[in-house]
Image: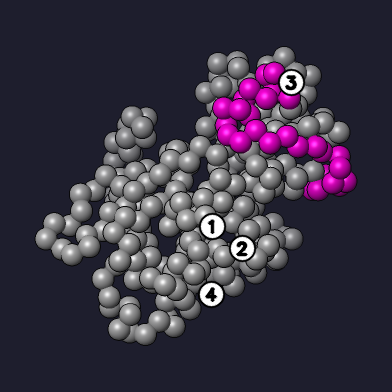
């Protein structure tokens, strides 16, 4: 089930240059993840899943609808150690998700590609399982309705609100600054922990702007609470599934099963009427 990661990045020649290091890290970690399963003795692979409750952490956004649906499925009756899959909503974003994964709060997480790769590059016990959302993420650069800023270019020398250091909101602001040739200290950062605090930070003047997913932020733009001044689009798939390597090695069968079920839920949504899916998202 890790092959979609490699497939996704094999099309890198059609995307922006300068992605070689990110591409290499992801393909290598995908290969390592596959090897975690292949190296297990066949007797161990045939064992029943001992993780009765597989906890899947993710942000409460539309693309995680398959995980909500999976979480609400009844367990298989009449089986020993019937699997339960609990989707845990995490308001803090990728930084909170990776911390929770490493601390054992979640077994699998859906998080931003750039945040996961950053953790892997720093040597954390995390491996990529596969791609959840292959399309790139569009970040809205938001400020208060009364601020003087008109574009990201105007934010040089100011303070950007981020959910956590190493989160997508931090990494993408930093990447955009580097792309414009700015020095590292041309942007300062203030940690606000979650989306609600980030909104408050620009209104109350603690930060000049912040980056968050475009459509999650749009209702606040429409109501005039925030003002969108720019957009930043990632040159890689938006969200990936990840787990701890040590956890996979200890129980490969459990992770193989949950990945198959996630994939089945995704394919099920693809074959549903678009209006029905849209209604299900709105009702969340």
The residue tagged with tag 2: helix, strand or loop?
loop
Q: Check disc 2 and report the residue beneath it.
A: 124
Above or below, 69 relative to 242: above
First reached walking from the N terminus: tag 2 or tag 3: 2
Q: Which residues are magenta?
A: 178-206
| Label 1 vs 2, first from the N-terminus | 1
Most foreground residue, 108 or 264: 108
Whether residue 200 is in magenta: the answer is yes
Asked if marks 1 and 2 touch (Cβ < 8 Å), the reply is yes
Q: Quadrant of the N terminus?
A: bottom left
Crowd around label 3: few <14 · some 14–19 · many ≥20 (10 Å):
few
**Front label number (2 vs 3):** 2
Relative vertical location of residue 91 with respect to residue 197 in this rendering, above or below: below
How many marks overall?
4
Query: Marks 1/3: CA distance?
Result: 33 Å
The residue mark sitting in front, 4 or 1, is: 1
**Residue 205: which disc?**
3
Q: Please report contact status of discs 1 and 3: CB closer than 8 Å, yes or no.
A: no
Q: Is residue 22 above or below residue 200?
A: below
Per the image, the residue denoted by label 1 is 102
Instruction: Tell me the residue at 68%/36% (across/down).
Output: 191
Give the colouring mode of the picture: one colour
């Amino acid at each position: 089930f890790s092959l979609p990661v490699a497939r996704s990045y094999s099309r890198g020649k059609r995307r922006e240059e300068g992605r070689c290091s990110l591409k290499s890290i992801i393909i290598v970690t995908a290969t390592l993840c596959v090897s975690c399963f292949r190296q297990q003795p066949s007797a161990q692979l045939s064992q029943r899943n001992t993780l009765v409750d597989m906890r899947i952490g993710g942000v409460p956004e539309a693309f995680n609808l398959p995980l909500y649906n999976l979480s609400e499925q009844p367990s298989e009756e009449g089986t020993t150690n019937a699997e339960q899959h609990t989707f845990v909503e995490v308001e803090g974003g990728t930084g909170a998700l990776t911390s929770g994964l490493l601390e054992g709060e979640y077994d699998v997480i859906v998080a931003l590609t750039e945040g996961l790769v950053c953790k892997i590059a720093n040597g954390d016990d995390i491996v990529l399982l596969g791609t959840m959302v292959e399309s790139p993420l569009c970040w809205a650069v938001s400020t208060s309705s009364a601020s003087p800023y008109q574009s990201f270019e105007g934010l040089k020398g100011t303070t950007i609100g981020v959910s956590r250091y190493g989160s997508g909101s931090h990494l993408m602001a930093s990447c955009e600054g580097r792309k414009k040739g700015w020095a590292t200290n041309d942007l300062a950062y203030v940690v606000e922990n979650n989306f609600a605090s980030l909104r408050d930070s620009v209104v109350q003047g603690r930060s000049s702007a912040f980056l968050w997913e475009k459509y999650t932020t749009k209702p606040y733009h429409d109501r005039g609470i925030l003002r969108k001044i720019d957009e930043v689009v990632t040159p890689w798939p938006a969200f990936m599934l990840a787990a701890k390597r040590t956890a996979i090695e200890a129980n490969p069968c459990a992770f193989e099963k949950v990945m198959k079920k996630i994939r089945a839920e995704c394919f099920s949504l693809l074959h549903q009427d678009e209006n029905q899916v849209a209604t299900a998202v709105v009702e969340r």
